[in-house]
Image: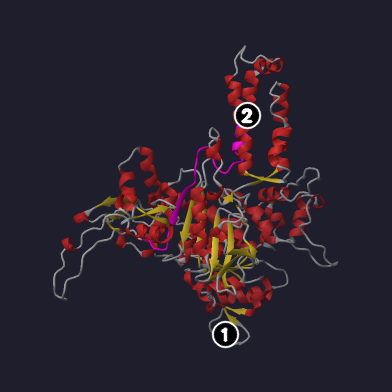
């Protein structure tokens, strides 16, 4: 995966882009999913298309062709990788020493260092040059024959020929693993523009008066991808020149991409038809895609897509379960949109280096479907995605997948000369200024069918993971799998802030916030805080069965001993001896402060400082509950990893969600 785009200075395509007022020199850090967020006309789409062109032009590395491996300056805009020179020397020095001892004296550490030109960092082009040195040595040694080399210093090399070749064959894969792409492979680039459809276009005109009868033959099919051709013309056709064969009457345009690089949905019919009638491994692509649609949107009912042409009009027909099949236009717009957006993931699922650019994929998508879309992308290890969007719901997913998502804000400024200037900033998380720029309103929380209220972000991480384990355990037995932001959502009330809310519709206290005006159909989960019995009593009275008071003092006390021990291992001091753990049951520590729980299980002085210093008489709580939760959930792999109390909570939450999602969505 590309982690940084380092721009080569002087490239016109990026001249108008800046970072904190300085000319843009790199776009970083990149992740698997990269959001470009900003107001209309802020330069998001323009920047995305320029990046797309460069990925398309990025050359394949051919170690047998030194000239092809090094691109022309005017056709190369950025490099994709940076490496510390000392790390490369460390990787290769032992190999080089062995090669010299075996007689390959033409390869030395000095020769490798010369390629770095004294720089602390090198890019993949320099690393490719190093690779080619070893590749050339491999060819020379392979061709070496007895009596061909007369010099004494080559006798050792000839004698150790097989050992030298074996050593080089060990070096080359180590370097290949560091390169952005395998040898002789280019990026597969796809652009999904804002104009897109799954339906074919037809020509013709309507009858001249209201009572005339229109015939199907009045609307012949238009051949070719109409939208894709227009996208090509608008953004990717350059360098117009007269066609000399036509005496200059026709113009020729050099395309920066091919039509095949655009996926507007217009070619879905052709691709489904080809897959349906192809060899088994190709048919399996369509089968996997149909399984995805079945699981996510149709409660496991079998889904079949078929490309047929009734009355001469190409159309995708969809069959769901035992229902009669019908044209895709009769599906909801959101389902059509998700089919169009996710199909390229499956179609190119086996293609190394797949780069996808999406223009506003949130169109027609319910927030829950937006989350499904992001999670579908995350399931494909070969894909890296760039998305121009206005959706705050996409931003929400960055909290759940911080290592997989990067967010860049875009802002358009006008210089004194009247020229546009685009400012690009990387954000660690969406802030209020950005949400205001997008025009986000609080009404978005009404879009899911029910809401789980939790104290904070760590509670949300745990309960999301608990539900995932439940789904995986019981889906095969017929239990429904529910989607966050579609069937349910989370609300964080901030612990003691709960006293400011009332869950009684008849509340008359003007100082209270009526919770049902913020979210509806609430299930509230609260720690069993000591000394707050009156609060628990009020919440129980107002919410009834929709209030769940944990049987533990803190949410962390729900962790099973196994998960807790594995998590604490990750917080061990680097130089401390191995942790030793005491046998203990979860029920033994349910009602005591979590710092005492950790002290009962292992030695606190061997752990990093996960608890702050507090005044005598006060009880320390985790310094960063969210980071601790992120680590802990990574050690939960099955339903059995959850404690009995955690399982009890999960079942209660699941039943609540199910009770508010009786209808198929």
Tell me which residue sits at (31%, 52%) in the image. 269
Q: Is residue 371 above or below residue 351?
A: below
**Position in image of residue 654 (x %, y %):** 51, 61
Residue 114: tell me if it is visible. Answer: yes
> Does the magenta run of residues contain 190?
yes
Query: Toward which corner of the image does residue 95 lie, by quadrant?
Result: top right
Instruction: Residue 612 in the image: state x and y as whole percent.
Output: 79, 62
Q: Position of residue 440 (x, y in %)?
A: 53, 74
Q: Which residue is mark 2?
A: 170
Q: Magenta segment range?
A: 169-196
- Say left or right for 99 vs 386: right
Secondary element under disc 1, as helix, strand or loop, is loop
Using a 10 Å C-alpha cutoff, classify the residue at mark 2 as few (fewer than 14 neighbours), some (14 to 19) or many (20 or more).
few
> On the image, numbered disc 1 is attached to which residue?
507
The residue sitting at the top extreme is 147
The count of marks equals 2
């Amino acid at each position: 995966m590309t982690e940084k785009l380092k721009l080569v200075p002087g490239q016109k395509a990026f001249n108008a882009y800046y970072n904190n007022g300085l000319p843009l020199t790199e776009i970083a850090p990149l992740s698997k999913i990269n959001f470009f967020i900003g107001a209309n006309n802020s330069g998001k789409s323009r920047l995305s298309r320029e990046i797309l062109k460069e990925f398309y032009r990025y050359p394949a590395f051919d170690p047998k062709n030194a000239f092809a491996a090094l691109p022309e300056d005017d056709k190369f805009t950025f490099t994709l990788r940076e490496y510390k020179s000392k790390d490369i020397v460390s990787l290769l020095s032992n190999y080089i020493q062995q090669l010299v001892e075996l007689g390959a004296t033409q390869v030395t550490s000095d020769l490798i260092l010369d390629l770095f030109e004294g720089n602390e960092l090198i890019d993949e082009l320099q690393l490719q040059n190093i690779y080619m040195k070893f590749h050339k040595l491999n060819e020379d040694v392979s061709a070496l024959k007895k009596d061909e080399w007369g010099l004494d210093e080559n006798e050792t090399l000839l004698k150790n020929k097989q050992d030298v070749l074996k050593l080089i064959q060990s070096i080359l894969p180590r370097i290949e693993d560091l390169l952005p792409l395998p040898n002789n492979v280019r990026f597969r680039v796809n652009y999904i523009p804002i104009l897109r459809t799954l339906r074919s276009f037809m020509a013709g005109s309507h009858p001249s008066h209201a009572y005339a009868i229109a015939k199907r033959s009045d609307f012949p099919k238009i051949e070719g991808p109409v939208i894709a051709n227009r996208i090509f013309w608008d953004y990717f056709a350059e360098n117009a020149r007269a066609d000399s064969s036509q005496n200059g009457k026709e113009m020729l345009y050099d395309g920066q991409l091919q039509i095949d690089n655009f996926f507007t949905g217009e070619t879905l019919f052709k691709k489904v038809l080809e897959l349906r009638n192809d060899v088994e491994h190709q048919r399996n692509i369509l089968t996997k895609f149909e399984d995805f649609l079945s699981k996510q949107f149709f409660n496991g009912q079998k889904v079949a897509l078929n490309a047929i042409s009734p009355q001469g009009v190409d159309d995708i027909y969809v069959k769901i379960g035992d229902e009669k099949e019908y044209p895709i236009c009769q599906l909801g717009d959101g389902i059509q949109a998700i089919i169009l957006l996710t199909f390229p993931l499956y179609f190119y699922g086996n293609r190394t280096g797949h780069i996808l650019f999406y223009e506003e994929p949130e169109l027609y998508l319910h927030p829950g479907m937006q989350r499904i879309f992001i999670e579908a992308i995350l399931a494909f290890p070969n894909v890296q995605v760039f998305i121009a969007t206005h959706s705050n719901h996409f931003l929400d997913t960055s909290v759940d997948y911080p290592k997989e998502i990067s967010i860049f804000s875009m802002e358009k400024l006008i210089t004194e000369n009247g020229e546009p200037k685009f400012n690009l900033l990387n954000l660690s998380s969406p802030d209020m200024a950005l949400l205001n720029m997008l025009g986000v309103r609080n009404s978005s929380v009404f879009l899911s069918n029910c809401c789980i209220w939790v104290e904070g972000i760590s509670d949300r991480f745990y309960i999301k993971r608990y539900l995932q384990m439940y789904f995986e355990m019981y889906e095969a037995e017929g239990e429904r799998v529910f989607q966050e932001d579609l069937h349910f959502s989370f609300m964080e009330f901030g612990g003691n802030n709960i006293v400011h809310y009332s869950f009684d519709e008849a509340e008359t206290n003007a100082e209270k916030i009526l919770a049902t005006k913020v979210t509806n159909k609430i299930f509230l989960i609260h720690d069993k805080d000591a000394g707050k019995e009156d609060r628990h009593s009020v919440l129980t009275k107002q919410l009834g069965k929709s209030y769940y008071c944990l049987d533990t003092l803190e949410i962390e006390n729900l962790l099973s001993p196994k998960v807790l021990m594995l998590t604490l291992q990750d917080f061990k001091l680097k130089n401390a001896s191995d942790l030793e753990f005491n046998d203990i049951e979860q029920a033994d520590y349910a009602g005591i402060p979590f710092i005492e729980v950790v002290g009962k299980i292992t030695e606190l002085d061997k752990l990093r400082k996960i608890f702050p210093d507090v005044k005598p008489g006060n009880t320390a709580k985790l310094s960063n509950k969210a980071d601790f939760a992120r680590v802990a959930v990574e050690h939960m792999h099955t339903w059995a990893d959850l404690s009995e109390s955690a399982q009890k909570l999960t079942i209660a939450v699941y039943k609540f969600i199910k009770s508010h999602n009786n209808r198929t969505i």
